[in-house]
Image (cartoon, grey):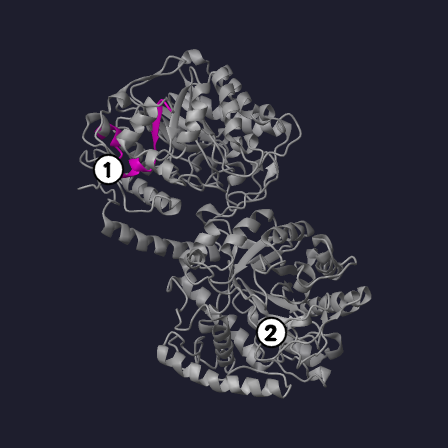
Amino acid sequence: MSLRRFPNAVNISSEILGQQLKFRNGRVSHNRFLKAALTEILSTYAPQEPKKHGLPTDTILNIYDKWGNGKFGMILTSNVLVDPTNLEAAGNAIIFKEGDSHERRALFSHWAKLMKQDGALAVMQLSHAGRQTPELVNPTPWSASDIQLVSAARFTTYGKPKPLTTEQVKTEVVDRFVYAAKYAYECGFDGIQLHGAHGYLLSQFTSPTTNKRTDKYGGSLENRQRVIIEIFDAIRAEIPASTGFLIGIKANSVEFQAEGTTLEQAKEMCRVYESKEFDFVELSGGTYEKLAFCYERESTRKREAFFLEFAEQIRPVFNKTVVYLTGGFRTVFAMVDAINNNATQGIGLGRPITAEPDLPKKILEGSVNSAVQDGFNQNDMAATAMASGSQMEQMGRNSLNDAGRNIMDQISDFSNDETVQRFGQALVDHLVQAGIDIADGKREQLKFRSGKTAQNRFLKAALTERVSTYDPENPKKHGLPTNFILNLYDKWGHGKFGTILTGNVLVDPTNLESAGNAIIFKEGDGEERRALFSQWAKNMKQDGALAVVQLSHGGRQTPITVEPNPWSASDVKLTGERRFTPFGQPVPLSVEQIKTQVIDRFVYAAKFAYETGFDGVELHGAHGYLLAQFTSPTTNKRTDQYGGSIENRQRIILEIYDAIRAEIPASTGFLVGIKTNSVEFQEQGTTVDDAKEMCQVYEDKGFDFVELSGGTYEKLAFHHMRDSTRNREAFFLEFAEKIRPVFKNTVVYLTGGFRTVKAMVEAIQNGATQGIGLGRPITAEPDLPKKILEGSVASSIKNALDENDFGITNLASNTQMQQMGRTSYQQTEQKPTHGISDFSDEETVNRYKEALKEYTVFMKTLASQNKPIHGVLVFEGIQQQA
């Protein structure tokens, strides 16, 4: 195997790396290399059988058989968990009293022997995941406080943590760490390392972002560090330093988070570790919310180690405690330079040694001057971590002897570009499968606080259909869902969504978004309307989706041809036109009218939805509709209790929520969500900070879900404003990432721009959202979620229309919906795409543009005659293949 190495690596003597490191308790490491902890997730997982739960497997033992012949000075295990229910992942090795057995002791003893084969010290990393336990492993893990983790690393969400009582800190944490340390000692390990970094339980105590306690374990830095010191003292009471058994700790040098552990706090804690006589400290950094295993600045890239500048400032506090620095080292020159500059004494290696398990041996022999230079983007933590995970699995397929003493046997060479490309495709396939697993509930479903569960993460977003009846002179016949509507949702109801939203159903018969909206209003109630809405709900639920009505009020966005004087928060008129039709002069609602014309209408519509079989409602509080006209300072100029401060501007939404819940309590399972703008992109409009503040209120109030979107009629935002947005697809992703942390129990959906499975999964993995809202792509493919979950597609259809031209793509989607609505699912022989124009075909697009010219003349004519435009462009296009 010809491995590519870093071309600019300087040839330099590695002699200093081969020097011994002496620990204060008398033990000696025969060189400076530390095999850092890398999570393998390859142990057994049998939570119902304690004796079989968390046992090291042959794969684990084979991996350490190879590292045990790599000439390390010290080898750390992966994070061995001390609590069987608070795991980093299913597949962690675990030491716990309830699972003790001869088999477990034999396996751990053999693990230690393999690690020591060529003289390395065998040290076990002991960990407790706390709030970083996946929800499916434990929905209510322990933590310092009740601050829920909102990241979604490894496609996983996390449970709501329970704060440990003072007594439980002793019984569930201190005692478990001590038991595991004694176990390691009895199985032949040379020491243990407490995992006090990366957001695990011990760092949940030390970090002010996660420790909000007011007892002796919270508040001051001394108090927050107390649990670690108590663990150390309790271990030393059982295993004195005179035994030579090492106790070290992995600590963050910095957390890179607002209110997180700072460099100065890290220095102070390290002074305590030195005075307390820890044998070694391994410096690292970052948390699940802010991963830091990448090069954020060019100066860091040149010096390689991610946390070098922080280590240089912390190192002077240590006198007898040995310091290791892990993360980023790739060349011998950088390793030697870090030691010569006294930033560290030992060099921790992680990802490079999954490519070369014997890298230290090669360096010390002088045969290489760097690690392998793989073909990945080193700042892509997800790809490189998955690649390392794959290499470890390959290492574990056989023992060193079975591999003919070839330590590199079966390990993929990711310095080979072709191999990287093949892995990239395999990774896409893996992400697709991850989406399938997520959606099928193999990893988790989306659980709402009122009790309902969505079968997967996909949300069919609201799309205005404009094909309901329009008969304002006849209330009983006005705004009725038509067969077009029912057929449309018959198709989406077979698309394998988790939740399906209707188009915006209006609550006022005169304040419409468009002629052709479906409407729920008391004056038009009747058996026919109830029967049609009930059928609509049934069609949406056919393959398990939750059926949710989006309730809306047009306010000042009502076309002048529908209502010349619509209601609004103030009298700020909407300029411009939609479909060549201007908007009327709005009339500000009085305080009394806010109750009778808005709140009461929303409540009536919500009860109607509940009674006709829907699973919930979504209040439309975005895109400039009436509720957004109240929340936005551009349209709300009131000076009463509904204007001025954010609290006042948001008041109407909370009053609607309270009034709905008074009629339909959360205990019924009926969902109440809201669609809200993450940002308005307008001068004096709602900012992302405003949105965060409002979303915090929605979380505190008890909303089941929030769908994040953005923009208004004046500033449409359903396109990519920058290349960085285009690369990540979702239009509002950067804003969602800022808002997402305020939510703990409210489920978050993000809608707009998603086109590939990769982007969808990454948005979830990065914690920006929990659910994926799809709009325009599903008018071309009503069963897109089903195809994605089956693994048959990795993206939506790429049409030949200009994606940044919202006008034409919106009209095209309306046309496709009209085509969907011509026949039922059964009439198309269960082919959801039957009769839908294929706008990926350029000839079809050209014909559509010609038809659009004629339709434009038609719309202009109606507008000039002051007539409302009811319906959409009817077009015959090339039928897609199902």
Above or below residue 20? Residue 99 is below
Label for residue 8?
A: 1
Q: Residues within 10 Å of mark 2 (few under 14, many from 20)?
A: few
Residue nearest the viewer, comparing 633 with 664: 633
Residue 480: x percent and y percent?
65, 80
> How far, Cα to Cα, is label 2 from label 1?
60 Å
Badge 2 amino acid: Gly
Q: Is residue 775 left or right of residue 662?
A: left
Marked residue nearer the N-terminal end (2 or 1): 1
Residue 205: x percent and y percent?
56, 31
Badge 1 amino acid: Asn
Q: Is residue 652 left or right of residue 336?
A: right
Residue 846: x percent and y percent?
39, 81
Does the magenta run of residues contain 381? Answer: no
Q: Residue furthest right?
A: 592
Residue 312: x percent and y percent?
41, 26
Q: Is residue 283 left or right of residue 818?
A: left
Nearer the observer: mark 2 or 1; the answer is 2
What span is in magenta?
344-362
Q: Is residue 370 left or right of residue 446?
A: left
User: What residue sits right under mark 2 in the picture?
Assistant: 576
Q: Quadrant of the N terminus?
A: top left
